[in-house]
Amino acid sequence: MKLKTTLVAATLALAFGAASAATLRVANQGDATSMDPHSLNESLQLSVTGNVYEPLVGRDEKLALKPALATAWRQTSPTVWRFELRKGVTFHDGTPFTADDVVFSFRRAAGEGSDMKSYTASIKEVRKVDAHTVEIETTAPFPILPDVISLVYIMSKKWCEDNKAELPVDRRKGVENAASFRANGTGPFRLRERQPTTRTTFQRNPNYWGKIEGNVTEVIFTPIGNDATRVAALLSGEIDLMEPVPLQDVPRIAANPNLKVMQGPELRTIFLGMDQKRDELLQSSVKGKNPFKDKRVRQAFYQAIDIETIKNRVMRGAATPTGLMVAPGIKGFVPELNKRLPYDPDAARKLLAEAGYPNGFEVGMNCPNDRYVNDGEICQAVAANLARIGVKVNLQAESKATYFPKILRRDTSFYLLGWTPGTYDSHNPLNALMHTPNDKGQGQFNLGSYSNRRVDELTNLIQSETDQAKRNAMIAEAFKIHQDDIGHIPLHQQALAWGMKKNVEVVQLPDNFMPFRYIHVK
């Protein structure tokens, strides 16, 4: 094994030039939970696996669509898109990439255990035309299909069959397979070693079909959950790049002559969700009924939250309070609706009393503590705010490795989540977060099962509408209904903060993806 590794390193040095070869040591507060690209629709997961796997249509440094495994695409009818596939591409094991892999991957992404169903919900059929041409037929006209499939990564049909990984890893049910620990994509980096929760090592793909803009030949990705430990690792030189930088440590890292901090806006919206379906909450002192089915209770929770204090004290100013479930920069954003209900504990107590809870009640709350910026602290602040109106929150904050399987099973009454629309279009959160859940994948992340028939109708109409003015009007109507219903409680858009050595140059994307191909170490 040592000899093999040495030979690979030597080959890389010859291929890229010994002087330009570089190892990058990256630390994040969390880990990708699996190497399976269809197992979890979560930004860090897709960012990490997106260095190994590729979609048909990708995105460039400005998040604009660009050819990836498809070189061209066009509509041949209102419901049919034809994709011309890139020739001469091989998977990391040398297997040629063909249309069979595309058909297989879309079927897998839409199948049992997949977390990517919201991206395939409107696809009726994916069919092979020839070895390097496929057609995707949708259930209705779908003008933004190329945007929607930019996160559906293509796997090798042969590799999955040979390794009994035809179905996705399903973390909800504790189902694992070879795709969780191994990987075989077409991307610019190969998976060399996987030690879950400890270290994952990637190696530059010398046979990559495209251009790799950076000079990194090896990436060592290490999850370091403790903020102080992660910062200490950067200060001591043990790592080269980390994210997120704890907000309280931004000035210290920025003042270090050997380090720098990159900060910028993120398209992610942090929000709270509530179980609005069960007749009795899983985690509550209220028996025989569900308080969250009453809009007055949802509004009381909303108006009890002191968002400005969360912004200033918890987020240290690095957050933008929001009244919408999307950020500025997302297509369809409605500025005039981006207004929060006022913080008003007295009004909140009155609403609770009107709903029949003059003394409040107890409810469980689920929260990650290693996924979003200060996520655990945000939930603690929310719990403290709710205590002032008589609601006792039993907070369970935990690692995302256990958090996501739990809430994705809907084993929750009240939860915190963050969402960046993978299409950068408002249809995405409407379809995934606000549409009534169904077996087609719509509402897949509507974990509290908010439901409004008109929002469902509008979401489906928005999908097919090509007149931009009409489309924007429908988006605004859907957002207004959801906002009036208090379907969720939006909190804020968080800001990005990455810390790194001064000799590291990266492209910081507002979706918080980190493509290794763009990183240069001087």
Image: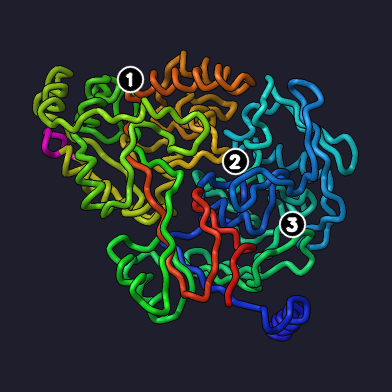
Q: Main secondary structure of the magenta part?
A: loop
Does the rendering let one see residue 4? no
Give the residue drawn at x 61%, y 56%: 49
Q: CA distance from mark 1 to mark 2?
A: 32 Å
> In the rendering, at what x and y percent does residue 9 appear?
71, 81
Counting residues from the start of the chain, the first of labels 2 and 3 encountered is 2
Circle 3 is placed at which residue position? 186
Residue 185 falls in which quadrant of the image? bottom right
Numbered disc in front, either 3 or 1:
1
Q: Which mark is residue 470?
A: none
From this view, report whether residue 460 is shown above or below residue 155.
Answer: above
Magenta stretch holds residue 391: yes
User: In terms of depth relative to the viewer, which is nearer, 470 or 119?
Assistant: 470
Residue 113 falls in which quadrant of the image? top right
Counting residues from the start of the chain, the first of labels 1 and 2 encountered is 2
User: In terms of depth relative to the viewer, which is nearer, 142 or 191?
Assistant: 142
> In the rendering, at what x and y percent does residue 439 appear?
57, 26
Q: In the drawing, does residue 118 fall left or right of residue 226?
A: right
Circle 1 is placed at which residue position? 484
